Image (spheres, rainbow, N blue to C red):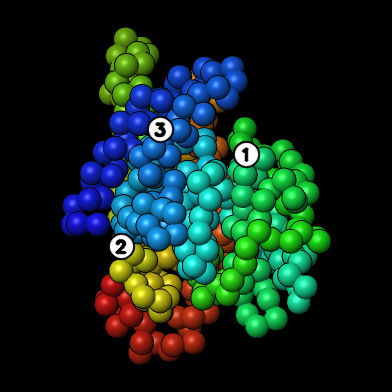
Amino acid sequence: MAEGSDSIVADTAARIFADLAEPQAVNRAKDGAWKMPLWNALSEAGLPLAWVPDRLGGSGADLTDGFAVLGVAGRYALAVPLAETLLAGWLLARAGIVAPATAMTVAPVRLHDRITLDGAGRLAGHASAVPFAAEAEHVAVLADGAQGPVVALVATRDCRVTPRRGITDDAGAMIGFDGVTPLKHAPAGIDRDTLMLMGSVVRAVETAGALEAILTMSVAYANERVAFERPIGKFQAVQQNLARLAGEVAAALAVSGSAADAMAQADDIDEGVFLEAASAKIRCAEAAQEGAAIAHQVFGAIGFTQEHVLHRFTLRMLAWRDDFGNESHWAAELGRRVAARGADDFWPLVASR
C-alpha cells in the first residue's frame, strides 16, 4: 500500500469500532449479539485478512497497516478475534496457504506447547490458552514436521476444544489436535521463535493502545470526581500517579511502535529485530502491570465492579502478558543473547536501533 495508508486503514477501523464496539455499550450488553455486526463490518473492510496477499484471499495490506489497526483495537479493548485472525492469516501466507474468510486463531501461543505432523499427515499434541478458540472456525497451526516447521490450516470443529476459566470473559481454551488431519499444510518458511516474536509485537501494540485508553479515562475521572469539595485531580498524590501512568503509556507507545516498524521492515529476524520485539514485550508487560494498578487506584472501588468499563482494559492487558512468552522469558532470553555477543558489541547493537 502507499505511504500513509496506515492512517487511512486505522481511521477506518476506528470508525467501525466507535459505531459497533464502544466499550461502555459492549460492557452493558447482556449477550454477544453485538459481535456479528462488528465482525461483518470488519470483514467488509478487509481488516481481518489485511496481512494476507490478494492472491491468497486477503487484502494485501502492509504489516504497518495491520499494526495501526491493532493499536486502535487496543484502545477499544476489542473482544473479537481480530488480532488472532490477522496473525493466523500472516502465518498461513508465509506458507502460501489460501486463508479462509472466517474468524481464525493461531496455535501455539505458549512457549512449551508442541504440535507435530506425522508422515501420514495427521497432527498430534495440544495447545493451551489459545485465544478465542471457541469462536474461531479455523486454527492456523505451526507444527513440527519431519523436514522442519509446517503450517497447517485446521477446522476447529475437528479438534477437541476444552474451555478454561480465565481473567477475561473471552479466555482461551485448550485445543487437542491428536489424530486431526489438516485441511491444508505446507512448509512454514519460519521457525517457532519468529511466530512468538511476531505475536509478542502484536500484544505489545494492543497493550499500548489499551494503556492510552485507560490514561484518558483516568484523567477524565480525576477531573470529575469531587472529594473534600474539589476534584481529586487537584490532589498532589493523584497528580503524581497520573504522571506515572502517562510515563508508562509513553514508554509503551514508543517501544511497541519501534518494534512494529522493525518487524514491518525486516526481511528476517536478525539480532536487531529480536532486540526490538523482545524489549517491546518486556516493557509493555511491565507497563500493563503498573498502569492497571495506577488506574484502579485513581478509580477506587468503582473500577473493580463488573458494571464499570475499566476492567475490560486492565484484565485484557494482564492476560496478554502471558501470550507468546511472558516478560520473564524474554528478559532471560535477551540477557543470554546480549551476554553471548560480549560487552564490546552491546552498545553498537543498542545504538543502531
- For label 1, the SS is loop
- For label 3, the SS is helix
At x 43%, y 50%, the residue is: 49
Q: Nearer the viewer, residue 323 or 338?
A: 323
How far apart are the two marked residues, 2 and 3, measured between alpha carbons?
27 Å
- The reply to whether residue 283 is visible in this rendering is no
Q: Which residue is mark 1?
A: 135
Q: Residue 163 location, x and y as percent?
A: 74, 41
How far apart are the two marked residues, 3 and 1, measured between alpha carbons?
17 Å
Which numbered mark, 3 or 1, is in the foreground of this view?
Answer: 3
Q: Is residue 49 above or below residue 255?
A: above
Q: Which residue is mark 2?
A: 261
Q: Which residue is mark 3?
A: 41
Q: Do labels 3 and 1 touch, CB within 8 Å?
A: no
The disc, 3 or 1, on the residue closer to the chain's N-terminal end is 3
- The reply to whether residue 143 is visible in this rendering is yes
Amino acid under label 1? Glu
